[in-house]
Amino acid sequence: MSEPTVPSVAASDAELDLDREVAPAIDYTRLYRLWEEHNWSAYAIDFSQDVMDWREQMTPEQRASARWNYSLFLQGEEAVARTLAPFVHADLTQEQRVFVTTQIVDEARHHVFFSRFMREVAGNGTDLATTLDSAQGNLTPGFRRVFGELDKLTDQLRRQPHNRALLASNILLYHIVVEGLLAHPGQHFMRESLAAHGLLPGFTVGIGHIARDESRHMAFGVQALSELVAESRANRRAVIAELDKVLPWAVAVFVPPNFDESYIRVFDLEPLDIYAFALRSLAAKLKRVGISPAEVPALVKLGVELPPEEQARRTMRLLRAGVLGSGDFPMHMDDEATALVFDGLERIANMRPGATLPGTIQWDFADASPWYLAPESTGLVVHRGRSVQPVLTLRCTLADWARIAGNQLNPQWALATRRLRMSGDVRVGLRLSSLLRA
């Protein structure tokens, strides 16, 4: 039996290396022609060796890991195929519209491929519908939040096809977050790990085809979004606001059941490497779009100027603490997590050039040591401890402050419900929300 050939993403479409920060503009007609050249069949993939590998070579832990991971892709491919239709009717050029129709075909094919594998190899379901249903229990809270947002945004685009800022937000969520931040790293590491273990050759070939398709889709998104961002400040603001909203949910998509990292390590992968790859790739795509990562508050909180590995470590620590995500993880605040929350606050407070305060803001926690934010010659600086004469004092639990910092609890709602109380200069208190969100 001859060895299957894994398609190379960088063969005839090397210009679609989107992790380069600077590159020429992407030609929509070229993307369409690449689609014609690289067509493939989901039903032509041979899973006979995969069935044997699944039963005889893979450990129970590897099978559990694969079921969890591939279920996310199965559901994700169905969702993106289903939600692309409003793009066809949106305010696009004819070249863009033609390419989007090819993407709908691609996403449907990807869904069929994952469904075939889950049914014929993993033994989940008997047809497209039952196989899709079988994956529901493996969906992570972050996945449900991100794809719920995709459903909402694309429905809005269906009703407002000429809203350019809304179109920009949709492309950001669809092509940069879902395909770029989430699917791209997943496909990259799946191919690497399966090749290293010599497992699932049919699946590996299919993922190669899918990765090549997705490189075209992301290229379309990067080019279209760069044009929209250059078009108006409103479009730019909408893109940054949407990314700031969904990023804490998106990073939670990678969280395995019960934070059990053996789901990832069972294939000799490290969670830190996956997060670092994803954040590095996101930064490169944003720069090609024309947005600096330093403009996105959610990225600033993670230390946007730090190496991707350190950003990844901070992300994982804040996820485990329950700060990032969507409020679905229990709060486990300790000294390190608290320091990261206040470090993020300092970074956000200094996003605007010359940011200042008339005095110190003090945090008094019922269940933790106090912190304060003080104006200094270098900018606004956080300190552990108590200020002598704060102009504003905030009182709440540390967990509730972490929820506010993680955008899980609205500060105005916290004030209205007395979960957050303040005393001192009311004018500084009124600036609190804008200070936290830059």
Image (cartoon, rainbow, N blue to C red):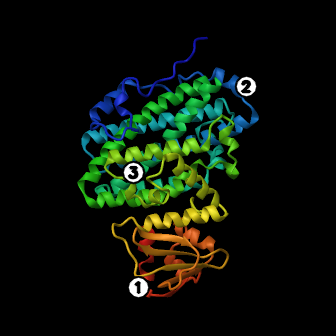
| Quadrant housing the C terminus | bottom left
Choose between 143 and 104: the one closer to the eye.
143
For the point 43% across and 56% down, the residue is 243
Q: Is residue 152 above or below residue 5?
A: below
Question: Upstream in the sequence, badge 1 or badge 2?
Answer: 2
Q: Residue furthest front?
A: 377
* Chain-order first, disc 1 or disc 3: 3
Q: Marks 2 and 1: in contact by CB < 8 Å?
A: no
> Where residue 69 sits: x, y (%)?
62, 41
Judged from the image, the secondary structure of the residue bearing numbered disc 3 is: helix
Quadrant position of residue 34: top left
Q: Which residue is denoted by mark 3 in the rendering?
A: 172
Q: Is residue 236 above or below residue 425?
A: above
Q: Is residue 84 visible?
A: no
The amino acid beneath tag 1 is: Arg
Residue annotated with mark 2: 57
Image coords of residue 131 (percent x, y): 63, 40
The residue at which mark 1 appears reads as 427
The N terminus is located in which quarter? top right
Could you tell me which secondary element the residue under label 1 belongs to?
helix
**CB contact under 8 Å: marks 2 and 3:** no
Kind of residue at disc 3: Leu
Please report the residue visible at 29 percent of the width from the left and 41 percent of the height from the top.
Answer: 96
Marks 1 and 3 close (CB-CB < 8 Å): no
Q: Position of residue 118 (x, y in %)?
A: 63, 35
Along the horizontal axis of the image, is 73 left or right of 378? right
Q: Residue 165, labelled with which disc?
A: none
Asked which secondary structure carries label 2, the reply is helix
C-alpha separation, residue under disc 1 versus residue under disc 2: 66 Å
Q: Nearer the viewer, residue 354 or 243?
A: 354
Q: Image quarter for residue 232? A: bottom left
